[in-house]
Amino acid sequence: MSNTGTTIQTWTRFYTNNAVEDISTGSGLQLLNEVYHGMFNPEYTLYFGGAKFRVGRNWPEAYQTNDLGVNTTAGTAAYTWLASPIYREEPIVELETSAGSGYYEPIPPGRDEDEWVRLQNASNSRPERYRRALSGSTMQLQFAPTPDTTSLDIRLRGQVEITKFTATTVADGTTQTLFFNEEPDQALAYFVSAHLKAKRGQTARAVELVQLGLGLLPASDPMPAHDTNQITAHYL
């Protein structure tokens, strides 16, 4: 089970041996969010004592499937993109195989402009490609060819951007991290504490704390990154 921001702060105070350590405001809150976000980026690395420690992972917790909120309309190519959540990388766009079927297949992104124009000028049919484009200030999901079928569900699947903690959510005792279990939360507190110790010139202790945190993380990514051009399976 995941833990609250309040618990992360309590652990940080223990690991730093500072009963008044505050990660709910100012630079402490900024540090908490930096490390928390970083742990969901597989390239995120900490540097202490001349050593580097890769602490980021592709956590499955950050992978979500969300309906676009509208279905296809025959003869309509463009649909408003989701305002929330924000995807950290290009998501997989999936389109229902038939109205109400509950079965989906991925629609790959467009390869280049020549292909897009060719498909865009084709007769209405099941879309073969998609792209994101601005229409004024509105981000759109555009299909090519234009759909010839109404009421097909559209959904997005991918890694979403993590919601940042605020002073309120650190202190409320109810807002939890996105992690499924406790070990990554403890690691988060270790890594935040390591930063705080390093800033105070206690580099050796910072390295110890990072190593303790790494011991709570999986050695490799729990979920491999996806490639929107390679996935061809159908999903329920």
Image (cartoon, rainbow, N blue to C red):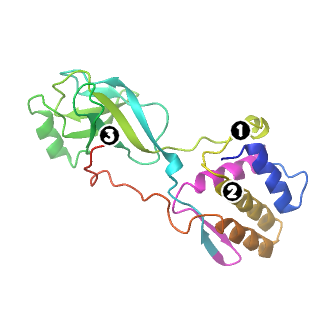
> What's the amino acid at mark 2?
Leu
Spatial CA span between label 3 and label 2: 32 Å
Does dot 1 land on a helix, a strand or a loop? loop
Q: Which residues are magenta?
A: 25-51
Q: Nearer the viewer, residue 223 or 133?
A: 223
Say how many tags the image has. 3
Spatial CA span between label 1 and label 2: 16 Å
Does dot 3 land on a helix, a strand or a loop? strand
Q: Earlier in the sequence, mark 3 or mark 1?
A: 3
Spatial CA span between label 3 and label 1: 31 Å
The residue under label 2 is 188
Q: Earlier in the sequence, mark 3 or mark 2?
A: 3
Q: Is residue 17 left or right of residue 74?
A: right
Q: Quadrant of the C terminus?
A: top left
The residue under label 1 is 166
> What's the amino acid at mark 3?
Val
The residue under label 3 is 93
